[in-house]
Image: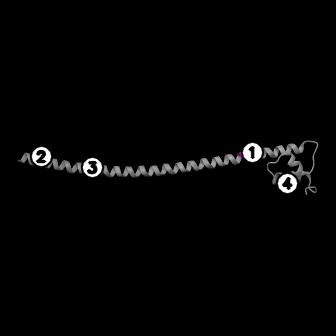
């Protein structure tokens, strides 16, 4: 299958087709057993690349999960801030109403005391 390809093309094809393979599989794919240990070195490099790719994938997934958690927390804070603003508006409204009632009570007491003094 690969007999017509140069060693460079065989190596390139090995990188493209397979990301994590062991040395025995690499030798079978290339169809030869070199004496120099080049295939074993290449297989080790491919295995390391697979491990690195897996680590990058895992880190990317963790980052995505962390980003999702941050987004969720920001949404919760936004919701809480909205509730706080609503509660502050209700407190202001109540304080304004209470101030109006205090003014009315002050006028009524003043009028009552004036009526008592006049009597």
Residue 52: which numbered mark, if any? 1
Residue 98: which numbered mark, if any? 3
Which region of the structure is painted magenta? 51-55
N-terminal of the pair, mark 1 or mark 4, is: 4
Q: Horizontal and vertical percent for residue 42?
A: 85, 45
N-terminal of the pair, mark 2 or mark 4, is: 4
Q: Nearer the viewer, mark 3 or mark 4?
A: 4
Q: Secondary structure at mark 2?
A: helix
Q: Secondary structure at mark 3?
A: helix
Q: How many marks?
A: 4
Magenta span contains residue 32: no
Q: Is residue 19 left or right of residue 57?
A: right
Q: Nearer the viewer, mark 1 or mark 2?
A: 1
For the N terminus, the image quarter is bottom right
Q: CA distance from mark 3 to mark 1?
A: 68 Å
Judging depth in this view, the residue of 16 and 107 nearest the camera is 16
Dot 1 crowding, Cα within 10 Å, few <14, some 14–19, many 20+: few
Q: Horizontal and vertical percent for residue 27?
A: 89, 48
Q: What residue does disc 2 label?
A: 113
Q: What residue does disc 4 label?
A: 13
Residue 90: which numbered mark, if any? none
- Say whether marks 3 and 4 touch (CB < 8 Å): no
Q: CA distance from mark 3 to mark 2?
A: 22 Å
Q: Nearer the viewer, mark 2 or mark 4?
A: 4
> Looking at the image, which residue sits at the far left?
119
């Amino acid at each position: 299958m690969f007999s017509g390809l140069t060693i460079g093309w065989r190596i390139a094809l090995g990188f493209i087709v397979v990301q994590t393979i062991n040395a025995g599989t690499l030798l079978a794919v290339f169809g030869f057993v070199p004496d120099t240990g080049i295939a074993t070195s290449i297989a080790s490099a491919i295995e390391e690349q697979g491990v690195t790719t897996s680590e990058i994938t895992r880190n990317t997934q963790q980052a995505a999960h962390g980003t999702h958690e941050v987004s969720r927390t920001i949404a919760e804070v936004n919701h809480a801030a909205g509730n706080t603003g609503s509660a502050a508006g209700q407190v202001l409204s109540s304080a304004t109403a209470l101030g109006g009632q205090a003014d009315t009570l002050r006028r009524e007491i003043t009028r009552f005391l004036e009526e008592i003094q006049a009597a």
